[in-house]
Image (tube, rainbow, N blue to C red):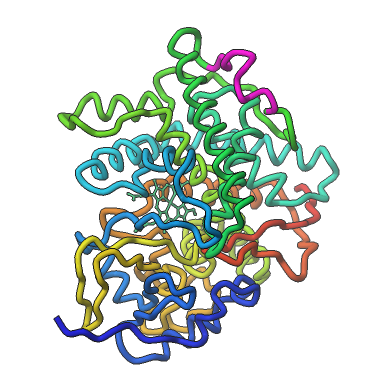
Amino acid sequence: MTDQVAQDLPALSELADERFARDPGFAYRAAHAQPGPGLFRMPTGDGLIATAHRTLADLMHHPALGAQHRRKRRSGAGAEGALARMDSYSPFFMNEPAHTPIAIATYRPMSPARNHPLIETITHAAERAMDDMLDRGGVVDLRRDYVQVIVRNFWVRFLGLPAEAAPLLEKCSAAIVPMLKFETTPEEVEIANRAAQTLRDYVEACHRTAGDSPAGDSPGGDSPGGDSTDGDSTGDDSTGDDSTSETFLNLFESVLADSDWNDVPRNAATTAAAITFDGIDSAAGGVANVVYTCLSHPDQWALLEENPGLVHHAWREAIRLEPPFFGLHRGAYEDIEYEGVRISAGTNLLMAWGAANRDPRVFENPDRFDIRRPKRRTLGFGGGPRICKGRHLAMLEGEIALRVLLERLASIELLVEEPDWGGPGMVRAIRSIPARLSPK
Ligand code: HEM
Protein backbone atom coordinates (compact mmCIF):
# COMPACT_ATOMS: atom_id res chain seq x y z
CA MET A 1 0.00 0.00 0.00
CA THR A 2 1.27 3.48 -0.79
CA ASP A 3 1.37 5.83 2.11
CA GLN A 4 -0.14 8.92 0.60
CA VAL A 5 -2.32 10.84 3.00
CA ALA A 6 -5.45 12.76 2.21
CA GLN A 7 -5.13 16.43 1.30
CA ASP A 8 -6.12 19.49 3.29
CA LEU A 9 -8.69 21.74 1.65
CA PRO A 10 -9.01 25.26 3.13
CA ALA A 11 -12.66 25.66 2.02
CA LEU A 12 -13.62 22.75 4.25
CA SER A 13 -12.53 24.68 7.33
CA GLU A 14 -15.95 26.35 7.04
CA LEU A 15 -17.83 23.06 7.42
CA ALA A 16 -18.66 23.85 11.01
CA ASP A 17 -19.62 27.38 10.11
CA GLU A 18 -22.89 29.25 9.54
CA ARG A 19 -21.82 30.10 5.99
CA PHE A 20 -21.65 26.44 5.05
CA ALA A 21 -25.04 25.77 6.64
CA ARG A 22 -26.57 28.59 4.57
CA ASP A 23 -25.08 27.48 1.26
CA PRO A 24 -22.50 24.68 1.04
CA GLY A 25 -21.98 25.12 -2.74
CA PHE A 26 -18.67 27.04 -2.40
CA ALA A 27 -17.07 24.21 -0.40
CA TYR A 28 -18.35 21.53 -2.79
CA ARG A 29 -17.01 23.46 -5.79
CA ALA A 30 -13.60 23.81 -4.14
CA ALA A 31 -13.51 20.08 -3.39
CA HIS A 32 -14.53 19.08 -6.93
CA ALA A 33 -11.92 21.38 -8.45
CA GLN A 34 -9.11 19.33 -6.86
CA PRO A 35 -7.47 16.54 -8.84
CA GLY A 36 -7.60 13.06 -7.30
CA PRO A 37 -10.29 11.08 -5.55
CA GLY A 38 -11.76 13.87 -3.41
CA LEU A 39 -10.52 12.51 -0.09
CA PHE A 40 -9.53 15.24 2.38
CA ARG A 41 -8.54 15.56 6.01
CA MET A 42 -11.39 16.74 8.20
CA PRO A 43 -10.68 20.28 9.37
CA THR A 44 -12.03 19.28 12.79
CA GLY A 45 -9.03 16.94 13.08
CA ASP A 46 -11.26 13.89 13.32
CA GLY A 47 -10.87 11.54 10.35
CA LEU A 48 -11.38 12.11 6.65
CA ILE A 49 -14.11 13.36 4.33
CA ALA A 50 -15.01 11.95 0.90
CA THR A 51 -16.61 14.31 -1.61
CA ALA A 52 -16.31 12.94 -5.17
CA HIS A 53 -19.30 11.04 -6.57
CA ARG A 54 -17.25 8.17 -7.98
CA THR A 55 -15.33 7.76 -4.71
CA LEU A 56 -18.49 7.55 -2.63
CA ALA A 57 -20.14 5.26 -5.18
CA ASP A 58 -17.15 2.91 -4.91
CA LEU A 59 -16.46 3.13 -1.18
CA MET A 60 -20.07 2.72 -0.08
CA HIS A 61 -19.82 -0.98 -1.02
CA HIS A 62 -16.51 -1.54 0.77
CA PRO A 63 -16.92 -4.38 3.29
CA ALA A 64 -14.40 -2.83 5.70
CA LEU A 65 -16.32 0.45 5.84
CA GLY A 66 -18.86 -0.23 8.57
CA ALA A 67 -20.62 1.69 11.31
CA GLN A 68 -18.93 4.86 12.48
CA HIS A 69 -16.52 4.46 15.39
CA ARG A 70 -17.95 5.99 18.55
CA ARG A 71 -15.66 8.64 19.97
CA LYS A 72 -15.43 10.59 23.15
CA ARG A 73 -17.11 13.86 22.33
CA ARG A 74 -14.79 16.86 22.09
CA SER A 75 -16.74 18.59 24.82
CA GLY A 76 -15.20 16.02 27.14
CA ALA A 77 -18.46 14.25 27.86
CA GLY A 78 -18.70 10.55 27.09
CA ALA A 79 -20.62 9.21 24.12
CA GLU A 80 -21.68 6.41 26.46
CA GLY A 81 -24.96 6.50 28.31
CA ALA A 82 -28.60 6.11 27.40
CA LEU A 83 -28.15 7.36 23.85
CA ALA A 84 -25.37 4.90 23.08
CA ARG A 85 -27.32 2.03 24.66
CA MET A 86 -30.38 2.84 22.57
CA ASP A 87 -28.36 3.47 19.39
CA SER A 88 -26.75 0.06 19.66
CA TYR A 89 -30.13 -1.37 18.55
CA SER A 90 -30.15 0.72 15.36
CA PRO A 91 -28.65 -0.77 12.18
CA PHE A 92 -26.80 2.51 11.69
CA PHE A 93 -24.49 1.65 14.60
CA MET A 94 -24.23 -2.10 13.98
CA ASN A 95 -21.66 -4.24 12.22
CA GLU A 96 -21.91 -7.81 11.00
CA PRO A 97 -23.16 -10.32 11.90
CA ALA A 98 -25.99 -8.28 13.50
CA HIS A 99 -26.23 -5.56 10.84
CA THR A 100 -27.78 -7.53 7.98
CA PRO A 101 -30.64 -9.20 9.91
CA ILE A 102 -31.58 -6.06 11.82
CA ALA A 103 -31.27 -3.89 8.69
CA ILE A 104 -33.59 -6.24 6.79
CA ALA A 105 -36.10 -6.44 9.65
CA THR A 106 -36.04 -2.63 9.86
CA TYR A 107 -36.47 -2.12 6.12
CA ARG A 108 -39.28 -4.61 5.40
CA PRO A 109 -42.06 -2.75 7.25
CA MET A 110 -41.18 0.40 5.24
CA SER A 111 -40.53 -1.26 1.87
CA PRO A 112 -42.51 -0.85 -1.40
CA ALA A 113 -44.18 -4.21 -0.65
CA ARG A 114 -46.24 -2.34 1.95
CA ASN A 115 -47.12 0.62 -0.25
CA HIS A 116 -50.83 0.41 0.27
CA PRO A 117 -51.07 0.87 4.06
CA LEU A 118 -48.18 3.33 4.07
CA ILE A 119 -49.78 5.54 1.40
CA GLU A 120 -53.15 5.39 3.11
CA THR A 121 -51.80 6.44 6.51
CA ILE A 122 -49.55 9.20 5.15
CA THR A 123 -52.30 10.61 2.91
CA HIS A 124 -54.71 10.66 5.84
CA ALA A 125 -52.15 12.56 7.94
CA ALA A 126 -51.47 15.05 5.10
CA GLU A 127 -55.16 15.72 4.42
CA ARG A 128 -55.84 16.31 8.12
CA ALA A 129 -52.88 18.65 8.45
CA MET A 130 -54.09 20.58 5.39
CA ASP A 131 -57.64 20.86 6.84
CA ASP A 132 -56.21 22.28 10.06
CA MET A 133 -54.02 24.81 8.25
CA LEU A 134 -56.91 26.07 6.16
CA ASP A 135 -59.23 26.20 9.19
CA ARG A 136 -56.69 28.48 10.85
CA GLY A 137 -56.82 30.99 8.00
CA GLY A 138 -53.94 29.81 5.85
CA VAL A 139 -51.01 31.79 7.32
CA VAL A 140 -48.85 28.93 8.50
CA ASP A 141 -45.40 27.51 8.93
CA LEU A 142 -45.25 24.65 6.44
CA ARG A 143 -42.51 22.90 8.38
CA ARG A 144 -44.21 23.09 11.80
CA ASP A 145 -47.86 22.87 10.78
CA TYR A 146 -47.65 20.54 7.80
CA VAL A 147 -44.47 18.51 7.29
CA GLN A 148 -43.81 17.95 10.98
CA VAL A 149 -47.44 17.02 11.67
CA ILE A 150 -47.50 14.51 8.80
CA VAL A 151 -44.34 12.70 9.82
CA ARG A 152 -44.92 12.57 13.59
CA ASN A 153 -48.55 11.45 13.23
CA PHE A 154 -47.55 8.81 10.72
CA TRP A 155 -44.72 7.63 12.99
CA VAL A 156 -46.82 7.12 16.12
CA ARG A 157 -49.44 5.19 14.17
CA PHE A 158 -46.75 3.14 12.48
CA LEU A 159 -45.30 2.21 15.86
CA GLY A 160 -48.82 1.44 17.17
CA LEU A 161 -48.51 4.12 19.89
CA PRO A 162 -51.36 6.26 21.20
CA ALA A 163 -51.86 9.51 19.29
CA GLU A 164 -50.98 11.62 22.33
CA ALA A 165 -47.44 10.20 22.19
CA ALA A 166 -46.64 12.33 19.12
CA PRO A 167 -45.40 15.51 20.90
CA LEU A 168 -43.27 13.49 23.31
CA LEU A 169 -41.62 11.52 20.51
CA GLU A 170 -41.09 14.68 18.53
CA LYS A 171 -39.49 16.44 21.48
CA CYS A 172 -37.15 13.54 22.24
CA SER A 173 -36.17 13.24 18.60
CA ALA A 174 -35.39 16.97 18.37
CA ALA A 175 -33.18 16.71 21.47
CA ILE A 176 -30.97 14.23 19.60
CA VAL A 177 -30.35 16.52 16.57
CA PRO A 178 -27.39 18.37 18.21
CA MET A 179 -25.53 15.05 18.36
CA LEU A 180 -24.95 15.49 14.62
CA LYS A 181 -22.99 18.69 15.16
CA PHE A 182 -19.20 18.52 14.94
CA GLU A 183 -18.90 19.72 18.52
CA THR A 184 -21.47 19.41 21.27
CA THR A 185 -21.71 21.01 24.67
CA PRO A 186 -21.97 18.87 27.84
CA GLU A 187 -25.54 20.22 28.26
CA GLU A 188 -26.53 19.02 24.78
CA VAL A 189 -25.09 15.59 25.48
CA GLU A 190 -26.92 15.43 28.80
CA ILE A 191 -30.25 16.49 27.24
CA ALA A 192 -29.85 13.98 24.40
CA ASN A 193 -29.13 11.20 26.88
CA ARG A 194 -32.21 12.04 28.93
CA ALA A 195 -34.33 12.17 25.76
CA ALA A 196 -33.01 8.78 24.66
CA GLN A 197 -33.85 7.25 28.03
CA THR A 198 -37.37 8.72 27.94
CA LEU A 199 -37.94 7.56 24.38
CA ARG A 200 -36.76 4.05 25.01
CA ASP A 201 -38.69 3.67 28.30
CA TYR A 202 -41.84 5.03 26.71
CA VAL A 203 -41.82 2.90 23.54
CA GLU A 204 -40.91 -0.22 25.51
CA ALA A 205 -43.67 0.46 28.07
CA CYS A 206 -46.24 0.99 25.31
CA HIS A 207 -45.13 -2.20 23.62
CA ARG A 208 -45.44 -4.18 26.85
CA THR A 209 -48.88 -2.71 27.54
CA ALA A 210 -50.03 -3.45 23.98
CA GLY A 211 -49.04 -7.06 24.56
CA ASP A 212 -51.34 -7.21 27.60
CA SER A 213 -54.31 -5.17 26.38
CA PRO A 214 -55.95 -3.87 23.20
CA ALA A 215 -53.59 -2.03 20.85
CA GLY A 216 -52.97 1.64 21.43
CA ASP A 217 -53.45 1.74 25.22
CA SER A 218 -50.83 4.01 26.70
CA PRO A 219 -48.63 2.77 29.51
CA GLY A 220 -49.42 3.40 33.17
CA GLY A 221 -49.63 6.77 34.91
CA ASP A 222 -45.97 6.80 35.93
CA SER A 223 -44.82 6.50 32.36
CA PRO A 224 -42.55 9.17 30.90
CA GLY A 225 -45.52 10.05 28.70
CA GLY A 226 -46.63 12.22 31.61
CA ASP A 227 -45.45 15.35 29.82
CA SER A 228 -46.66 14.19 26.43
CA THR A 229 -49.08 17.07 26.13
CA ASP A 230 -46.23 19.59 26.34
CA GLY A 231 -45.63 21.63 23.27
CA ASP A 232 -47.72 22.00 20.20
CA SER A 233 -50.15 19.16 19.77
CA THR A 234 -52.02 20.80 16.91
CA GLY A 235 -53.10 18.35 14.30
CA ASP A 236 -52.58 15.23 16.38
CA ASP A 237 -54.55 12.50 14.89
CA SER A 238 -56.53 10.41 17.29
CA THR A 239 -58.67 8.74 14.66
CA GLY A 240 -57.81 5.61 12.77
CA ASP A 241 -58.17 1.93 13.16
CA ASP A 242 -54.70 0.80 14.14
CA SER A 243 -54.32 -2.84 13.43
CA THR A 244 -52.22 -4.78 15.90
CA SER A 245 -50.56 -6.81 13.16
CA GLU A 246 -49.48 -3.92 10.95
CA THR A 247 -47.27 -1.92 13.28
CA PHE A 248 -43.53 -1.57 12.77
CA LEU A 249 -43.00 -3.54 15.97
CA ASN A 250 -45.02 -6.54 14.89
CA LEU A 251 -43.69 -6.58 11.35
CA PHE A 252 -40.12 -6.28 12.62
CA GLU A 253 -40.61 -9.21 14.96
CA SER A 254 -42.29 -11.35 12.33
CA VAL A 255 -39.38 -10.86 9.88
CA LEU A 256 -36.95 -12.11 12.54
CA ALA A 257 -39.27 -14.92 13.64
CA ASP A 258 -39.52 -16.21 10.04
CA SER A 259 -35.77 -16.21 9.63
CA ASP A 260 -33.03 -18.47 10.88
CA TRP A 261 -31.03 -15.59 12.30
CA ASN A 262 -30.20 -16.32 15.86
CA ASP A 263 -28.00 -14.42 18.25
CA VAL A 264 -28.94 -10.97 17.01
CA PRO A 265 -29.75 -8.24 19.55
CA ARG A 266 -33.49 -8.32 18.87
CA ASN A 267 -35.76 -5.95 20.69
CA ALA A 268 -38.35 -4.43 18.39
CA ALA A 269 -39.33 -1.66 20.79
CA THR A 270 -35.74 -0.54 21.38
CA THR A 271 -34.98 -0.59 17.65
CA ALA A 272 -38.17 1.42 17.07
CA ALA A 273 -37.04 3.95 19.69
CA ALA A 274 -33.54 4.02 18.18
CA ILE A 275 -34.79 4.88 14.69
CA THR A 276 -37.38 7.39 15.90
CA PHE A 277 -34.86 10.16 15.21
CA ASP A 278 -34.79 8.97 11.58
CA GLY A 279 -38.55 8.45 11.45
CA ILE A 280 -39.28 11.96 12.66
CA ASP A 281 -36.33 14.35 12.23
CA SER A 282 -34.64 12.88 9.15
CA ALA A 283 -37.97 12.49 7.42
CA ALA A 284 -39.26 15.94 8.39
CA GLY A 285 -35.93 17.56 7.46
CA GLY A 286 -35.91 15.86 4.07
CA VAL A 287 -39.55 16.64 3.28
CA ALA A 288 -39.18 20.25 4.48
CA ASN A 289 -36.14 20.73 2.21
CA VAL A 290 -38.09 19.28 -0.71
CA VAL A 291 -41.17 21.45 -0.12
CA TYR A 292 -39.09 24.61 0.33
CA THR A 293 -36.84 23.93 -2.66
CA CYS A 294 -39.83 23.37 -4.94
CA LEU A 295 -41.70 26.43 -3.70
CA SER A 296 -38.67 28.72 -3.83
CA HIS A 297 -38.26 28.00 -7.56
CA PRO A 298 -41.53 29.40 -8.97
CA ASP A 299 -40.79 28.22 -12.54
CA GLN A 300 -40.37 24.65 -11.30
CA TRP A 301 -43.47 24.87 -9.08
CA ALA A 302 -45.44 26.09 -12.11
CA LEU A 303 -44.22 23.03 -14.02
CA LEU A 304 -45.46 20.81 -11.21
CA GLU A 305 -48.84 22.55 -11.19
CA GLU A 306 -49.14 21.91 -14.93
CA ASN A 307 -47.95 18.35 -14.62
CA PRO A 308 -48.30 16.77 -11.15
CA GLY A 309 -46.90 13.57 -12.67
CA LEU A 310 -43.49 15.20 -12.19
CA VAL A 311 -43.78 14.94 -8.41
CA HIS A 312 -41.39 11.99 -8.23
CA HIS A 313 -38.81 13.85 -10.35
CA ALA A 314 -39.19 16.89 -8.09
CA TRP A 315 -38.58 14.74 -5.01
CA ARG A 316 -35.45 13.16 -6.48
CA GLU A 317 -34.03 16.43 -7.70
CA ALA A 318 -34.69 18.31 -4.44
CA ILE A 319 -33.09 15.53 -2.36
CA ARG A 320 -30.11 15.64 -4.73
CA LEU A 321 -29.64 19.38 -4.30
CA GLU A 322 -30.65 19.82 -0.65
CA PRO A 323 -30.43 16.54 1.27
CA PRO A 324 -31.17 16.88 5.01
CA PHE A 325 -27.72 15.43 5.87
CA PHE A 326 -24.84 16.74 3.81
CA GLY A 327 -22.92 13.75 5.10
CA LEU A 328 -22.89 10.91 7.61
CA HIS A 329 -20.00 8.85 8.95
CA ARG A 330 -18.78 5.38 8.23
CA GLY A 331 -15.88 3.78 10.09
CA ALA A 332 -12.88 1.90 8.62
CA TYR A 333 -12.35 -1.50 10.31
CA GLU A 334 -9.27 -2.42 8.26
CA ASP A 335 -6.71 -0.32 6.43
CA ILE A 336 -8.26 0.68 3.12
CA GLU A 337 -6.36 2.02 0.15
CA TYR A 338 -8.29 4.01 -2.39
CA GLU A 339 -6.52 5.46 -5.43
CA GLY A 340 -3.31 5.73 -3.46
CA VAL A 341 -4.85 7.30 -0.37
CA ARG A 342 -4.74 5.39 2.89
CA ILE A 343 -7.79 5.23 5.14
CA SER A 344 -6.37 3.61 8.25
CA ALA A 345 -8.31 1.20 10.43
CA GLY A 346 -9.99 3.15 13.22
CA THR A 347 -10.59 6.23 11.02
CA ASN A 348 -14.02 7.76 10.65
CA LEU A 349 -14.83 8.77 7.09
CA LEU A 350 -17.48 11.43 6.59
CA MET A 351 -19.32 10.37 3.44
CA ALA A 352 -20.38 13.76 2.03
CA TRP A 353 -23.40 12.61 0.03
CA GLY A 354 -24.46 16.23 -0.47
CA ALA A 355 -21.14 17.06 -2.15
CA ALA A 356 -21.30 13.97 -4.38
CA ASN A 357 -24.77 15.03 -5.49
CA ARG A 358 -23.31 18.26 -6.82
CA ASP A 359 -20.32 16.74 -8.58
CA PRO A 360 -20.13 18.43 -12.01
CA ARG A 361 -18.56 15.27 -13.46
CA VAL A 362 -21.96 13.58 -13.02
CA PHE A 363 -24.52 16.40 -12.87
CA GLU A 364 -24.37 19.14 -15.44
CA ASN A 365 -24.80 22.58 -13.89
CA PRO A 366 -25.09 20.91 -10.48
CA ASP A 367 -26.26 23.90 -8.42
CA ARG A 368 -29.35 24.35 -10.61
CA PHE A 369 -32.70 22.94 -9.50
CA ASP A 370 -34.22 21.30 -12.57
CA ILE A 371 -36.98 18.76 -12.05
CA ARG A 372 -36.64 17.60 -15.66
CA ARG A 373 -32.95 16.79 -15.21
CA PRO A 374 -32.04 13.46 -16.84
CA LYS A 375 -31.95 10.63 -14.31
CA ARG A 376 -28.51 10.06 -12.78
CA ARG A 377 -27.48 8.14 -9.73
CA THR A 378 -28.14 10.48 -6.80
CA LEU A 379 -26.70 9.53 -3.42
CA GLY A 380 -28.84 11.42 -0.89
CA PHE A 381 -29.71 8.14 0.85
CA GLY A 382 -26.21 6.70 0.77
CA GLY A 383 -25.75 3.34 -0.88
CA GLY A 384 -24.50 -0.22 -0.70
CA PRO A 385 -25.47 -2.52 2.15
CA ARG A 386 -25.81 0.41 4.56
CA ILE A 387 -28.15 2.45 2.34
CA CYS A 388 -30.94 4.27 4.20
CA LYS A 389 -33.65 1.83 5.27
CA GLY A 390 -36.31 4.54 5.43
CA ARG A 391 -35.75 5.87 1.90
CA HIS A 392 -38.98 4.51 0.47
CA LEU A 393 -41.02 5.80 3.40
CA ALA A 394 -39.35 9.23 3.17
CA MET A 395 -40.07 9.32 -0.56
CA LEU A 396 -43.75 8.52 -0.01
CA GLU A 397 -44.00 11.19 2.68
CA GLY A 398 -42.36 13.77 0.42
CA GLU A 399 -44.37 12.95 -2.67
CA ILE A 400 -47.67 12.85 -0.81
CA ALA A 401 -46.89 16.16 0.93
CA LEU A 402 -46.27 17.78 -2.47
CA ARG A 403 -49.32 16.15 -4.05
CA VAL A 404 -51.71 17.35 -1.34
CA LEU A 405 -50.30 20.91 -1.64
CA LEU A 406 -50.86 20.79 -5.41
CA GLU A 407 -54.35 19.30 -5.15
CA ARG A 408 -55.74 21.49 -2.40
CA LEU A 409 -54.17 24.91 -2.95
CA ALA A 410 -54.68 27.57 -5.60
CA SER A 411 -51.56 29.41 -4.51
CA ILE A 412 -48.78 29.42 -1.91
CA GLU A 413 -46.91 32.60 -1.07
CA LEU A 414 -43.61 32.06 0.73
CA LEU A 415 -43.15 34.57 3.56
CA VAL A 416 -39.44 33.94 4.10
CA GLU A 417 -36.42 35.51 2.43
CA GLU A 418 -33.44 34.19 4.38
CA PRO A 419 -34.38 30.68 5.44
CA ASP A 420 -32.76 29.07 8.49
CA TRP A 421 -31.13 25.81 7.41
CA GLY A 422 -30.24 24.80 10.96
CA GLY A 423 -26.72 23.66 11.59
CA PRO A 424 -23.86 23.99 11.52
CA GLY A 425 -23.33 20.26 11.54
CA MET A 426 -24.19 17.27 9.40
CA VAL A 427 -27.89 18.10 9.47
CA ARG A 428 -28.86 20.81 6.98
CA ALA A 429 -32.62 21.00 7.15
CA ILE A 430 -34.82 24.02 6.86
CA ARG A 431 -36.30 24.92 10.24
CA SER A 432 -39.27 27.03 9.25
CA ILE A 433 -41.28 27.77 6.08
CA PRO A 434 -43.70 30.64 6.78
CA ALA A 435 -46.29 30.81 3.99
CA ARG A 436 -49.74 32.12 3.08
CA LEU A 437 -52.03 29.50 1.55
CA SER A 438 -55.06 30.08 -0.68
CA PRO A 439 -57.37 27.09 -1.07
CA LYS A 440 -58.83 26.04 -4.42
C1 HEM B 1 -35.22 12.33 3.39
C2 HEM B 1 -35.02 11.63 4.49
C3 HEM B 1 -33.80 10.78 4.74
C4 HEM B 1 -32.54 10.88 4.25
C5 HEM B 1 -31.98 11.87 3.23
C6 HEM B 1 -31.75 9.79 4.81
C7 HEM B 1 -30.42 9.56 4.55
C8 HEM B 1 -29.67 8.53 5.08
C9 HEM B 1 -28.28 8.30 4.81
C10 HEM B 1 -27.38 9.17 3.91
C11 HEM B 1 -27.90 7.19 5.48
C12 HEM B 1 -26.49 6.55 5.51
C13 HEM B 1 -26.41 5.53 4.39
C14 HEM B 1 -25.03 5.00 4.10
O1 HEM B 1 -24.10 5.09 4.92
O2 HEM B 1 -24.86 4.46 2.98
C15 HEM B 1 -29.06 6.70 6.19
C16 HEM B 1 -29.08 5.58 6.98
C17 HEM B 1 -30.22 5.12 7.61
N1 HEM B 1 -31.47 5.66 7.57
FE1 HEM B 1 -32.04 7.32 6.55
N2 HEM B 1 -32.56 9.07 5.63
C18 HEM B 1 -33.82 9.62 5.61
C19 HEM B 1 -34.93 9.18 6.26
C20 HEM B 1 -34.99 8.02 7.00
C21 HEM B 1 -36.18 7.48 7.61
C22 HEM B 1 -37.58 8.08 7.47
C23 HEM B 1 -35.80 6.35 8.27
C24 HEM B 1 -36.62 5.39 9.08
C25 HEM B 1 -37.74 5.63 9.61
C26 HEM B 1 -34.39 6.16 8.06
C27 HEM B 1 -33.66 5.12 8.57
C28 HEM B 1 -32.31 4.90 8.34
C29 HEM B 1 -31.57 3.78 8.88
C30 HEM B 1 -32.14 2.69 9.78
C31 HEM B 1 -30.25 3.91 8.43
C32 HEM B 1 -29.07 2.98 8.74
C33 HEM B 1 -29.01 1.94 7.60
C34 HEM B 1 -27.94 0.90 7.77
O3 HEM B 1 -26.88 1.18 8.33
O4 HEM B 1 -28.19 -0.24 7.30
N3 HEM B 1 -33.92 7.20 7.30
N4 HEM B 1 -30.13 7.53 5.93
Q: Is residue 181 left or right of residue 49?
A: right
Residue 237, compared with residue 184, is above or below; it is: above
Residue located 48% across and 29% down the image:
159
- Residue bounds of the magenta highlight: 216-227
Residue 59: % across, % down: 26, 68
The N terminus, quarter of image: bottom left
Is residue 273 among the parts visible in the rendering? yes
Residue 136: % across, % down: 83, 40
Count of picture labels = 0
Identify the image quadrant of residue 292.
bottom right
- Could you say which is closer to the camera, residue 199 or residue 272? 199
Q: Is residue 296 left or right of residue 276?
A: right
Identify the image quadrant of residue 45.
bottom left
Q: Residue furthest top?
A: 213
| Magenta residues, dominant SS class | loop
- Could you say which is closer to the camera, residue 247 or residue 40? 40
Residue 211: % across, % down: 43, 12
Residue located 39% across and 91% down the image:
34
- Could you say which is closer to the camera, residue 84 or residue 211? 84
Residue located 29% across and 25% down the image:
254
Q: Is residue 285 left or right of residue 48?
A: right
Residue 96: % across, % down: 21, 47
Q: Residue furthest front?
A: 76
Q: Residue 421 colored magenta?
A: no
Is residue 314 among the parts visible in the rendering? no
Residue 213, compared with residue 257, is above or below; it is: above
Q: Is residue 191 left or right of residue 311?
A: right
